[in-house]
Amino acid sequence: MTSGSPEQLTYLSGPVLVIGTGLLGASAALGLRALGLSVGLRDASPTAQRVAVDLGAGVAVPPGAAFAPELVIVATPPDVAAAVVSGALREFPQATVIDIASVKASILRALLADEALGETELSRYVGAHPMAGRERSGPVAARGELFYSAPWIVVPHAGSSAAAVRVAKAAGADLGASVTQMDAEEHDRSVALISHFPQVASSLLASRLLDAPGAALALAGNGLRDTTRIAASDPALWIQILSHNAPAIVPILHGLREDLDRLIGTLEAPEAAGAALDLAQLLSEGNQGQARIPGKHGAPPQSFATVGVIVDDKPGQIARLLSDIGEAGINIEDLRMEHSAGYQVGLVEIQVIPGRRDELEGTLSALNWKVVQ
Amino acid sequence: MTSGSPEQLTYLSGPVLVIGTGLLGASAALGLRALGLSVGLRDASPTAQRVAVDLGAGVAVPPGAAFAPELVIVATPPDVAAAVVSGALREFPQATVIDIASVKASILRALLADEALGETELSRYVGAHPMAGRERSGPVAARGELFYSAPWIVVPHAGSSAAAVRVAKAAGADLGASVTQMDAEEHDRSVALISHFPQVASSLLASRLLDAPGAALALAGNGLRDTTRIAASDPALWIQILSHNAPAIVPILHGLREDLDRLIGTLEAPEAAGAALDLAQLLSEGNQGQARIPGKHGAPPQSFATVGVIVDDKPGQIARLLSDIGEAGINIEDLRMEHSAGYQVGLVEIQVIPGRRDELEGTLSALNWKVVQ
């Protein structure tokens, strides 16, 4: 660990060059600048680059400028990432170069096939994937804290040097992320399953609503809202992700199609022998799959107890509720708000560890809150 | 409107007989009792019935007892609802009889085919579907407020009398629900799309996680959590719902399969001409479908602005945050907590109307909250 500034100890020494100053690149730059590291910026769009400079994310480093980065972070869209990484490996012969695109195998394949790169250049390349990013995009939305507590997956290839892997991990650690390591195939299979597949499933589900009668949609509850929320994602980015990771996504979709075909067969003859058992199996597999998702803070999956409270839809009501819970010394594990059409009240669902539910219900009832479950 | 008690004006006069004292039946009974109405209870399970009586939901009314209800609420599982309704229509010749199962056409078909029932009996039957209910079941979980602000769909058939429809609506209104009306086919198609289909899709999605490596699951974010949350639902209840509403669900699943086949074809040749356009269309249809889901309180769909705040995972932190927001007079439209593996901090995402985002960000930053977007 070296000292990047008088105030903050950092794993990186700097300087760092960020190529691509969209949301992720500018956020990484801001986060590293805040630690006192020297940061250079470069973007194919002069406007995006100027905005990032104006935000204080770093100084502009045009191609050919005298700049000797310890680390180059390539934060471009996936379809140009390999070409930009290749250029950076050649332009900065001392630097570790990482890209932070959300697909890894296709970029690695392109680099390994790149005749301009030798083993020495390639040893300085390490893939990375910070699983952060919000619905907004562009440098204006950037925040140095974007990577706080998010996974930062470091993806070395067989030829990556230990030194380069260390630098790739250091960047994640300095940005406050939770650093893990996978190879490119494992990474792509993992994100296909836990990120790309849910995105596709949500889009497929929401597509069915296109022609839905308004009276049906008016009945929408949290089930529909939850399952379709990510269907609102930006198509432009997802076309690239899905195209680049197609080989990892397709087998999952084949599995879905098999289950779907079996389900359709069952529901087309719901009175047939075995139909109820088939349905039970599908639903039970869904139960079991859902239960495997880890809980908060990487803890084992845990069922929290839910307490529902009816509140008026006015400023300060929820604060007052949570203040009452805080004063009782009960920690809230999760919290959701539920609204229904036509009423100016909402249901707040508070999740606590099961052993404290009764206490919480008693406390809230005693304070005249409308506890509903 | 008639007066059911000195304290509360009610639409119903009572008495009301609730048959089936599980979560929904016992909740309805408690809610009506709280309004001062006379409520009788009956359940095939002596234990469930005794618990409901002990909870103060009403008095036991065994078959043959002298009891002349204005309304009988049949709150049994869907597979016995028609038989219980038929029995109640004959046992109580003056009563309106409603069932509150979440499927309607199959129950109506069974009643219309029931040779023990004439037109006069059938004129007193009206279907209903309160869209409420939580993950817990049984009378112990019952709360009189369960139906507050939830949709209460009244489903008359061609032969229902106006008087019976009025009583079915009165029950929903007295329980604080939001009363609407549909016919059985429209109801079943609507709930197939906005409730049963998301349930099935979520189960299918979560089933894919059965064999997922733990390292992949450790990367799970809110996208996966949201899309699979309802996959945790109770299989026993859903087998009945899906079996009974199969005719309305199957066409939606055929539509899903067509989209899925097209998507698989596209991703199997992601470099083919038109592949990007196909993906763009799928994702954009998902965007549009999602955008059709109405906003809070039945308002038009609205995009709220999101402000993210990093908080420590300690009691009282969120209360302090929301108290600061309440004091600034800013109303919270929605609120979510996001956790990541390995960190004892959480991200609270606060949704407000877009015009107040900047003010909220300024206010919170000035109070030293870590605003991240």
Image (cartoon, coloured by chain):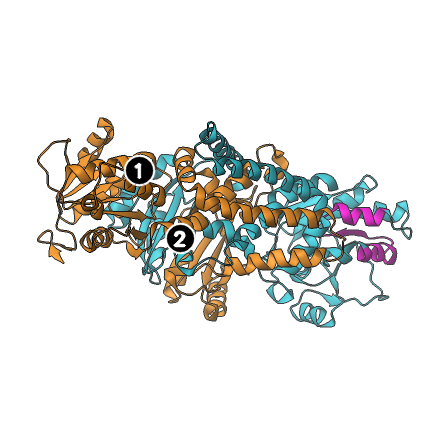
Chain colours: A cyan, B orange
For the C terminus of chain A, which image quadrant?
top left
Which residue is depicted at the point 38% across and 46% down?
A: A350
Viewer-proximal residue, A169 or B147?
A: B147
Residue for badge 2: A337
Mark closest to the chain's N terminus, 1 or 2: 2
Same-chain status of marks 1 and 2: yes
Viewer-proximal residue, A255 or B181?
A: B181
Viewer-proximal residue, A162 or A255?
A: A255
**Magenta stretch contains residue A102:** yes
Tag 1 near tag 2, CB within 8 Å:
no
Instruction: Kindly identify which chain the residue marked by label 1 belongs to.
Output: A
Which residue is depicted at the point 81% across and 42% down?
A: A160
Place of residue B321 in the rendered image (x, y in percent of width and height, measured from the top left)? 42, 57
Residue for badge 1: A358
Determine whether, in the image, residue A267 is placed left or right of residue A50.
Answer: left
Callout 2 amino acid: Met
Which residue is depicted at the point 68% across and 67% down?
A: A52
Neighbor class of circle 1 (other Cα within 10 Å; few <14, some 14-19, many 20+) is few
Quick one: SS at disc 1? helix
Q: Is residue B201 above or below residue A215?
A: above
Place of residue A75 in the rendered image (x, y in percent of width and height, measured from the top left)? 72, 57
Determine whether, in the image, residue B331 is placed left or right of residue B283.
Answer: left
Quick one: SS at disc 2? strand
Cα distance, mark 1 to mark 2? 21 Å
Q: Which residues are magenta?
A: A83-112
